[in-house]
Amino acid sequence: MYFTGLQIKKRPGRIIVAAPHDGDDADGLSDGNSGLIAARLAERLGASLVLARNLRRLVDVNKDPENVADPRLAAWCRRYQERIFRPLPLLVLEIHGHVSGHFDLEISTGYRGIDAAYRERLELYRRDLRQAIDHFWLPCGPLGEIKKPTLGVFPLDADVKLKATRTYTFQLLRALRLLGYPCYGLHVEIHRYLRLPPPGGPDLHAALVEILAAGIKRFLPGR
Ligand SMILES: [Zn+2]
């Protein structure tokens, strides 16, 4: 029997790593291993973890609770969002899994209208991520046999498919920024082949965690 519910790990600081859709990929709804990757990334960054385990088959906790008819399921959405937004975060990294994106790794701010300063830090972040991918996928390196992931960052790369522009968490982050709170969100979509590698191979999750951690200092200057 799987654990079903929220798994929380509090750490000091205002960075949150969250995974709303962790669960068994075979149900066609959950993002397999997204929780495992999120937990390792949170530990690597010294960030808090908000992990929704096996809830996706019941409810998408990343939805507006007002639009969820069943009050028990709406309560899961509310709890997930409260854990992210109390106290106010500086950065929310939300980890997902996809099978149909344009890029193997798709990262989105959740909205198109970013100002020049935000664009500049996002460009540096993308550059750091690309360098980290190149570093891990050196020819003849341990990951050489595995396909080198392509990377898209929205809104810099318009081809990103999973933009998260209608995702509730990112709508809340956008609203907070419009109200003057300096908080950021990065919606991270990881292709299935990177999340569920065949057993016995190299530690692909360790490489993913290092790649995703690569540009964070530059993304949050002065931290
Ligand atoms: Zn997801």
Image (cartoon, rainbow, N blue to C red):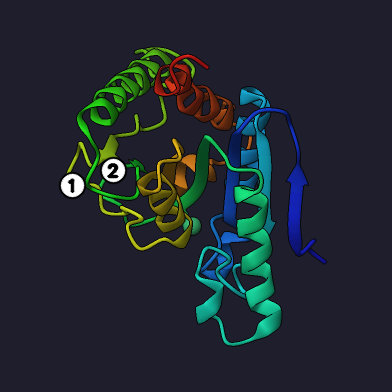
Residue at x 39%, y 13% (from the top left corner): 135
Relative placement, left or right, of 168 versus 69 is: left
Q: Amino acid at mark 1?
A: Asp
Dot 1 surroundings within 10 Å: few (below 14), some, or many (20 or more)?
some
Asked if marks 2 and 1 touch (Cβ < 8 Å), the reply is yes
Q: Is residue 206 above or below residue 3?
A: above
Does the residue tagged 1 have its C-beta within 8 Å of any atom of ligand 1? no
**Residue 121 in view:** yes
Query: Which image quadrant is residue 6 in?
Result: bottom right
Residue at x 53%, y 41% (from the top left corner): 197
Q: Is residue 89 above or below residue 76?
A: above
The numbered mark, 2 or 1, whose residue comes first in the sequence reads: 2
Relative placement, left or right, of 141 versus 117 is: right
Relative placement, left or right, of 70 versus 212 is: right
Provide the residue designation for mark 1: 159
x then y, percent, for residue 162? 32, 54
Determine the residue located farthest toward the bottom in the rendered image: 69
Provide the residue designation for mark 2: 103
Of the pair 209 and 61, the residue shown nearer to us: 61
Q: Secondary structure at mark 1?
A: loop
